Image (cartoon, helix red, strand yellow):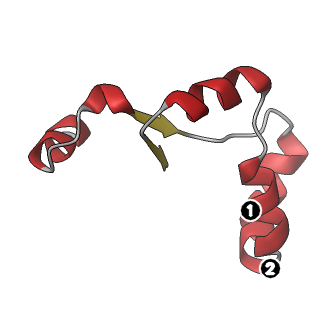
Amino acid sequence: MNFNDLLTGKDINPQDVIVMRRRPREAPLRKVLPWLAAERPDLFNAYQQTQRETVEKTVLTAKYVDRI
């Protein structure tokens, strides 16, 4: 079973879903991100909510967005 099977099983068209994986390009930020999520969830959430303009446009057109 794969993710598309799960979506289809819930009557969700996989074409309507965007799955996002946010990984910083900067090594120091990648290193501190787990700490930030645990100790400063407010800052972590602010970081997660910030996207590049092209990604922002794509997200706005999707019916569903999932983060992994």
What residue would you read off at disc 1? Answer: 45
Residue at the image point whose x is 58% and y is 33% from the top: 59
**Precedes in sequence: disc 2 or disc 1:** 2
Q: Residue 39 — which label?
A: 2
Q: Which picture quadrant has residue 17?
A: top left
Q: Residue 54 — which label?
A: none
Image position of 45 with respect to 26: above or below? below
Q: How many marks?
A: 2
Task: Name the spot of residue 5 as percent of width and height, x first.
Answer: 14, 39
The amino acid pointed to by label 1 is: Asn
The amino acid pointed to by label 2 is: Glu
Q: CA distance from mark 2 to mark 1?
A: 12 Å
For this view, does 61 lie left or right of residue 63? right
Task: Name the spot of residue 14 as percent of width and height, x first.
Answer: 27, 31
Classify 10 Å Cα crowding around label 2: few (below 14), some (14-19), many (20 and above). few
Q: Dot 1: what SS? A: helix
Image position of 47 with respect to 34: above or below? above
Task: Name the spot of residue 29 as percent of width and height, x first.
Answer: 86, 49
Image position of 61 with respect to 24: above or below? above
For this view, does 7 lie left or right of residue 64? left
Residue at the image point whose x is 80% and y is 32% from the top: 25
Q: Which picture quadrant has residue 60?
A: top right
Camera-near label (2 vs 1) is 1
Classify 10 Å Cα crowding around label 1: few (below 14), some (14-19), many (20 and above). few
Image position of 52 with respect to 10: above or below? above
